[in-house]
Image (tube, rainbow, N blue to C red):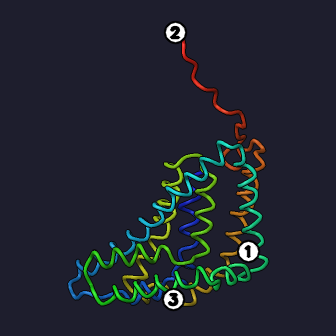
């Protein structure tokens, strides 16, 4: 998947992020000093971007392995289909997954650690809150991860997830600076259009996997492995 889609996914999903993670952003420890207040919010959001970038290392590696195995097109189509199913049956699969005996306690521990850090308004604490926040369940993060899986290198996977995080930055930073910048009515209006944006992205994943030869949208993907270098004496 082209890197520009990562920033687009983050930007489109940022208001969704405000709804899901906004309670943390709104409740961050406050500082009366204007510049420290701003710097703290920046550190918090950079923490989230750091987590997404680290996730990009792992999923970029997996994507590289998938590409070398020749399954990249199938994976892209599969991700697109899963996204469509998530739109048709919202919440069912994720609810069962995150209420399971293994994952639910991990999420509870994450939230507990975030809560303890709220008692300390230091820059490091705000950065760590952002790092932990980036690990909490979020549908649009999964879309970003899906995109990083379709990249063919670790570097591309990191770049994809970093750009995704930077796409969420404007709205999330605004939300953490002032709760009244984005009204509830605006958020609700945008949320109604989010499924449309997600459906478009799902179609893009499927078209990319089909490799129809359409520039940027569905480019031809080479299925021929790179020949090994020959040793000449």
| Between 202 and 71, the one nearer to me in the picture | 71
Disc on the earlier residue, 2 or 3: 3
Spatial CA span between label 1 and label 3: 27 Å
Q: Residue at x 60, y 71 (%)?
A: 140
Crowding at mark 3 (Cα within 10 Å: few <14, some 14-19, many 20+): few
Q: Are marks 2 and 1 in contact (CB under 8 Å)?
A: no
Q: Residue at x 49, y 54 (%)?
A: 159
Residue tagged 2: 233
Question: Depth-wise, is mark 2 or mark 3 nearer the camera?
Answer: 2
Q: Quadrant of residue 102?
A: bottom right
Q: Quadrant of residue 137?
A: bottom right
- What's the mark number on residue 86? 1
Disc on the earlier residue, 2 or 1: 1
Residue tagged 3: 183
Callout 1: SS: helix
Crowding at mark 2 (Cα within 10 Å: few <14, some 14-19, many 20+): few
Spatial CA span between label 2 and label 3: 71 Å
Vertical arrangement, residue 154 with respect to residue 29, above or below: above
Lateral position of residue 151 relative to residue 36, left or right: right
**Residue most extreme to the front:** 101
Vertical arrangement, residue 136 with respect to residue 11, above or below: below
Callout 3: SS: loop
């Amino acid at each position: 998947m082209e890197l520009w889609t990562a920033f687009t996914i983050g930007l489109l999903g940022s208001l969704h992020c405000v709804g899901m993670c906004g309670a943390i952003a709104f409740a961050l420890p406050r500082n009366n000093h204007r510049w420290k207040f701003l710097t703290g919010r920046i550190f918090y959001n950079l923490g989230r971007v750091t987590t997404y970038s680290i996730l990009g290392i792992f999923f970029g590696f997996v994507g590289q392995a998938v590409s070398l195995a020749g399954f990249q097109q199938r994976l892209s189509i599969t991700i697109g289909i899963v996204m469509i199913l998530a739109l048709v049956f919202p919440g069912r699969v994720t609810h069962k997954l995150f209420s399971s005996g293994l994952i639910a306690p991990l999420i509870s521990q994450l939230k507990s650690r975030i809560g303890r850090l709220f008692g300390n308004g230091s820059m490091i604490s705000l950065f760590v809150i952002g790092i932990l926040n980036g690990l909490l369940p979020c549908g649009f993060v999964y879309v970003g991860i899906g995109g990083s899986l379709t990249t063919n290198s670790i570097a591309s996977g990191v770049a994809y997830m970093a750009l995704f995080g930077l796409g969420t930055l404007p709205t999330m930073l605004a939300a953490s600076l002032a709760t009244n910048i984005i009204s509830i009515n605006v958020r609700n209006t945008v949320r109604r259009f989010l499924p449309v944006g997600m459906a478009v992205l799902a179609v893009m994943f499927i078209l990319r996997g089909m490799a129809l030869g359409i520039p940027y949208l569905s480019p031809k993907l080479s299925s021929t492995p790179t020949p090994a270098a020959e040793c000449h004496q």
